[in-house]
Amino acid sequence: MGMRGGERRRVRERLELLAAAELDPDDARREAIITLRRAVGFGRWCWPLTDPTSGLAVSGIGEFDFWPSLPRLVALEEHGDLARKPHLVVGACASAGSASPAAAN
């Protein structure tokens, strides 16, 4: 069931107030997440900050429960995507020789 017009308007107004408030940026982001979580509902979130010129992630905040996967995710971020670096995901067993003959066609 979606939000009704009045609920949507209140969420938008709250977010606009937060954007105009003189809050610490991380505090403003956390308040926005609280507002959005009540309205939309979600379990995990992240708010990365990226340098607009270089496109590099410079910092961020988030709430997640996948700490055991974090080293692998950082390696993927730093070394490329799955198509170029499959060994980062599946380990040393990833090789062209392990593909089935049908995959080569």
Image: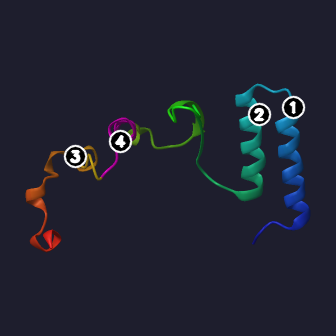
The part of the image, by quadrant, that contains residue 31 is top right
Q: Residue furthest front?
A: 53
Looking at the rendering, the stretch of residues picked out in magenta corresponds to: 71-82
Going from N to C along the chain, the mark reached first, 1 or 4, is: 1
In the picture, the disc for residue 87 is 3
Callout 1: SS = loop
Amino acid type at circle 3 is His
Residue at 27% in and 48% down = 84
Q: Residues within 10 Å of mark 4 (few under 14, many from 20)?
A: some
Amino acid type at circle 2 is Ala
Give yes or no for contact between labels 2 and 1 (Cβ–Cβ under 8 Å).
Answer: yes
Going from N to C along the chain, the mark reached first, 3 or 4, is: 4
Q: Is residue 102 depicted above or below 75 in this figure?
A: below
- State the separation of the CA atoms marked 1 and 4: 37 Å
- State the separation of the CA atoms marked 3 and 2: 39 Å
In the picture, the disc for residue 28 is 2
- State the separation of the CA atoms marked 2 and 4: 30 Å
Q: Is residue 14 left or right of residue 100?
A: right
- State the separation of the CA atoms marked 3 and 4: 10 Å
Q: Which residue is mark 1?
A: 21
Does the magenta portion include 77? yes
- State the separation of the CA atoms marked 2 and 1: 8 Å
Residue at 50% in and 43% down = 65
Give yes or no for contact between labels 3 and 1 (Cβ–Cβ under 8 Å).
Answer: no
Give yes or no for contact between labels 2 and 4 (Cβ–Cβ under 8 Å).
Answer: no
Does the magenta portion include 72? yes
- State the separation of the CA atoms marked 3 and 1: 46 Å
In the picture, the disc for residue 76 is 4
Q: Which one is in front, 43 or 92?
A: 92
